[in-house]
Image (cartoon, helix red, strand yellow):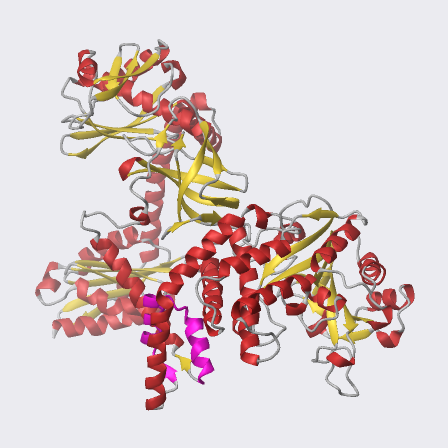
């Protein structure tokens, strides 16, 4: 068997599956795209999930990849064993409803035995214990004796995660020989030792789990197979571990040379050599995909790995910055498979050098303080470092908690993690509160204050909606950075931009910024001090970095619609001054693609006639198709044109004047139409007061107006349909319905009164004598509250002096009413207090005046108790 290198094996695998009609796709970024369930891509299948779930159509039904992956679940174990690593490459072949078990099994065997040249007698397949189909294929079609096919249970050979697609697996193990074994006479496939290594896993996705352990066959069965490239290389090259395969060994040897140490002579030295080797690979690939060091998310993983590598370099006695030179070895060893490493070489080295330098400035102080703390703990016999101390090391000296834990662990100590996180939360709250206090200028301190003051931007968007420019600064939400990657939010600054930043009442442009490696969706454009224009948004694809040449493209439709609304405000102001008088001044405005809002000085509500007149003047100007002429001119010359300035605004020596056919002339820095006819029409939809002497008009033009009328028409048709009319006779139909409704209401009221009278029947028979007063407490089914009040008044007249308590149930709800005569009130009766005392029986509450009260409840079963209790309460009131 030939000892193929890592780069050769990768090429052989992809070419083999291309020969089987698979599309060889480039490795996806380590940054998950539109997948919030993952921090980093951790398997070959992960970026292909949309194809398996049907959310996206795959470019071909057969696909093969070599996917770069990072797994961070056991960072603490990296280095301690030769098995663990954070970065690895996963070879995979995938079928989306195309081939299934027969082809997947045959091709895995063919590649391993005929292409790579592994000894077939040293390969052992395993199957899920209930997967007879896979067993038969291995045994009868591939010719593997039954005793060499291992059956394992669900834990080992069935892939599933809760509900959804799942299925059995078939793995292939390679016998590496006795020298890797445990020496036990019964050592075989499945043993925990390193002799039998699993190198290939075929996952047959054929079932759907409903979440309750019930499985049904999937209509579209998929194949998801994976093989660790480094693991395969360790088998092919017959070496101890992944740290001994050619490309990784070259990096490990480089670390050894820098440290002046030999690998394999001392356990602690080997731990540090392996940590640095693995972590430098990870950070090099992560940065190439635009992941930047930060204190949260994947950026924190990167920072953690970098600092862990730095610290182990010091343990080995390596002085100064050493990580960039190691990253060069990573790039040299992997650029054949990942050319982006070479393309981004300078960028990768710059980021690593900057982060390492930053950490080295504080690490000595931090190590010294931690050493003192450990000494104190050992003297006092304490085993746990306080959370406050661990947090201070993190906050002041940049020590990630896991680094502090690792150093403590070497001394048999630990850190109070809960206390650490509690201290972190206190600091975050303090920071949030402090942000409200602001800086010495009285403005919130933001990441933008960290930008070099010399950075400035030029707006070139009056005459064009796209341009090419260089990215000069990038920021995340919290810090200036060198790059942003897929899913990262941030702000982009360029030398020249066609994007209009929010100002003068006009909302910002949105759009897209594209580079050779990425795409950024601009959600807002902001103007900052020093002439900086920031494009705020999110990276939607790939990565963008400082120094990239970018194509900036404004959303043309949004800009055009905003311009129409903006130009309409100029015509509107002129019309208002004409109709209402020259006292009208602009007091504020807001325009976007949907509508316009214009605030103006005026001291009374506009009449409908005034609104119609203003609308007419604006629409007349639109219909005249006035050309819009825009010029920059000295302010004194501009004033001579009669141009309207914004009241209270300060202008420079040169101003921009927008002239609409001589009808409206204003100072303005916003974007406008070239001819008023583009506005189409204007409709005022509201006029209201917003402050003393300030009125507000909201209006629509062009597309927004058409949408408004479409909605109005749809509502009118819907209303007409409901009353069996047409839009043309809707008013007449509604008039008839109102008349009919009025008559029916009168009839219903009459019937209710009649029913109430009938329900009352002979309830006077239920009158009780309470002292020299009378009490009538009775239940009347199906009477509403109005009916109870009417009957109460009638009963009161017939009663003489006394109290009437009436209850009624309808549709599960109870109405309760109490009324008392003037004489009863004088003797102590109080309807409001009485009803409060008995309303609890019906599961409700109420109250009222001494002579009249009412209550509601939801417990009809309590009516009898309430009426009985009324007698007790009245007796107490009279005593």
Q: Where is residue 598 drawn, in percent x and y?
A: 26, 28
Image position of 396 with respect to 13: above or below? below
Task: Indicate whether residue 386 is drawn in magenta.
Answer: yes
Q: Nearer the viewer, residue 18 or 358?
A: 358
Image quadrant where one finds the N terminus: bottom right
Q: Where is residue 342 drawn, in percent x and y?
A: 58, 48
Q: Where is residue 21 drawn, in percent x and y?
A: 79, 47
Which residue occupies 63% across, 56% down? Answer: 333
Task: Indicate whether residue 440 is drawn in magenta.
Answer: no
Question: Which residue lies most toward the left here?
Answer: 826
Residue 37 visible in the displayed image: no
Residue 714 visible in the displayed image: yes
Image position of 509 with respect to 240: above or below? above
Q: Where is residue 557 drawn, in percent x and y?
A: 45, 27
Image quadrant where one finds the C terminus: bottom left
| Among the 4 quarters of the image, the one containing residue 815 | bottom left
Range covered by the magenta-colored residues: 384-412
State the predominant SS element of the stretch in magenta.
helix
Image position of 64 with respect to 273: above or below? above
* Number of disc labels: 0
Which residue occupies 46% across, 76% down? Answer: 406
| Among the 4 quarters of the image, the one containing residue 353 | bottom left
């Amino acid at each position: 068997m030939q000892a193929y290198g890592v780069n050769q094996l990768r090429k052989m695998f992809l070419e083999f599956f291309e020969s089987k009609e698979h599309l060889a796709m480039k490795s996806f970024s380590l940054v998950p795209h539109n997948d919030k369930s993952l921090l980093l891509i951790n398997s070959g299948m992960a970026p292909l999930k949309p194809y398996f779930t049907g959310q996206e159509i795959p470019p071909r039904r057969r696909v093969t990849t070599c996917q770069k992956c990072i797994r961070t679940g056991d960072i603490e174990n990296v280095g301690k064993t030769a098995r663990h690593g954070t970065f690895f490459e996963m070879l995979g072949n995938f079928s989306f409803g195309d081939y299934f078990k027969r082809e997947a099994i045959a091709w895995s065997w063919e590649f391993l035995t005929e292409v790579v040249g592994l000894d077939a007698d040293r390969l052992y397949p395993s199957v899920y214990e209930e997967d007879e189909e896979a067993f038969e294929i291995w045994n009868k079609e591939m010719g593997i004796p039954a005793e060499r096919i291992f059956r394992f249970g669900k834990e080992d050979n069935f892939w599933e995660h809760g509900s959804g697609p799942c299925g059995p697996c078939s793995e292939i193990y390679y016998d590496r020989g006795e020298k890797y074994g445990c020496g036990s006479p019964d050592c075989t496939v499945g043993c925990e030792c390193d002799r039998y290594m699993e190198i290939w896993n075929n996952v047959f996705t054929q079932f759907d789990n409903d979440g309750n352990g019930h499985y049904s066959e999937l209509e579209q069965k998929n194949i998801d197979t994976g093989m660790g490239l480094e693991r395969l290389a360790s088998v092919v090259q017959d070496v101890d571990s992944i740290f001994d395969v050619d490309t990784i060994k070259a990096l490990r040897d480089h670390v050894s040379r820098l440290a002046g140490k030999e690998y394999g002579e001392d356990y602690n030295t080997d731990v540090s050599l392996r940590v640095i080797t693995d972590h430098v690979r990870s950070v090099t690939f992560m940065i190439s995909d635009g992941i930047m060091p930060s204190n949260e998310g994947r950026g924190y993983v990167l920072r953690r790995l970098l600092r862990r590598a730095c610290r182990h370099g010091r343990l080995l006695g390596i002085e100064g910055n050493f990580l960039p030179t190691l990253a060069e070895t990573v790039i040299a060893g992997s650029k054949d498979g990942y050319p982006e490493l070479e393309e981004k070489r300078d960028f990768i080295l710059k980021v690593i050098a900057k982060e390492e330098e930053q950490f080295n400035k504080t690490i000595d102080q931090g190590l010294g303080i931690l050493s003192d703390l450990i000494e104190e703990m050992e003297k006092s016999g304490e085993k746990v470092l306080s959370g406050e101390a661990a947090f201070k090391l993190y906050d002041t000296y940049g020590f990630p908690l896991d680094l502090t834990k690792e150093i403590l662990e070497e001394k048999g100590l630990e850190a109070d993690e809960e206390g650490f996180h509690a201290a972190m939360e206190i600091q975050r709250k303090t920071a949030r509160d402090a942000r409200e206090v602001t800086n010495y200028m009285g403005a919130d301190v933001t990441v933008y204050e960290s930008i070099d003051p010399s950075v400035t931007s030029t707006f070139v968007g009056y005459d064009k909606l796209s341009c090419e420019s260089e990215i000069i600064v990038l920021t995340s939400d919290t810090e200036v950075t060198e790059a942003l990657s897929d899913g990262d939010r941030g702000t982009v600054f360029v030398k020249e931009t066609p994007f209009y930043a929010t100002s003068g009442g006009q909302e910002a442009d949105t759009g897209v910024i594209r580079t050779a490696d990425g795409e950024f969706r601009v959600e807002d454009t902001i103007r900052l001090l020093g002439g900086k224009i920031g494009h705020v948004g999110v990276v939607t694809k790939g990565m963008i970095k400082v120094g990239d040449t970018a194509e900036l493209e404004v959303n043309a439709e949004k800009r055009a619609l905003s311009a129409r609304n903006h130009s309409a405000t100029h015509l509107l102001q002129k019309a208002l001054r004409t109709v209402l008088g020259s006292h009208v001044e602009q007091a504020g405005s807001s325009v976007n693609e949907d509508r316009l809002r214009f605030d103006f000085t005026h001291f009374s509500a506009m009449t409908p006639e005034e609104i119609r007149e203003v609308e007419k003047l604006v629409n007349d100007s639109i219909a005249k198709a006035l050309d819009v002429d825009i010029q920059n001119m000295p302010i004194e010359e501009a004033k001579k044109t009669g141009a309207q300035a914004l009241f209270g605004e300060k202008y420079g020596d040169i101003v921009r004047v927008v002239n609409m056919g001589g009808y409206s002339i204003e100072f303005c820095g916003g974007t406008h139409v070239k001819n008023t006819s583009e506005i189409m029409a204007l409709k005022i939809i509201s006029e209201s007061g917003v402050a003393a002497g300030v009125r507000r008009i909201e209006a629509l033009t062009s597309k927004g107006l058409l949408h408004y009328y479409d909605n109005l028409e749809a509502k009118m048709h819907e209303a007409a349909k409901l009353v069996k009319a047409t839009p043309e006779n809707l008013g007449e139909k509604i008039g008839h319905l109102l008349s009919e409704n009025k008559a029916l209401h009168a009839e219903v009221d009459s019937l209710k009164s009649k029913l109430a009278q009938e329900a009352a029947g002979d309830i006077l028979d239920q009158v009780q004598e309470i002292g020299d007063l009378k009490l009538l407490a009775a239940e009347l089914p199906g009477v509403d509250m109005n009916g109870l009040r009417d009957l109460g008044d009638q009963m009161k007249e017939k009663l003489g002096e006394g109290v009437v308590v009436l209850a009624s149930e309808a549709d599960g709800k109870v109405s309760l009413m109490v009324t008392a005569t003037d004489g009863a009130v004088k003797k102590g009766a109080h309807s409001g207090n009485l009803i409060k005392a008995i309303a609890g029986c019906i599961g409700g509450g109420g109250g009222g005046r001494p002579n009249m009260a009412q209550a509601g409840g939801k417990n009809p079963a309590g009516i009898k108790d309430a009426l009985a209790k009324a007698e007790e309460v009245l007796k107490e009131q009279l005593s």
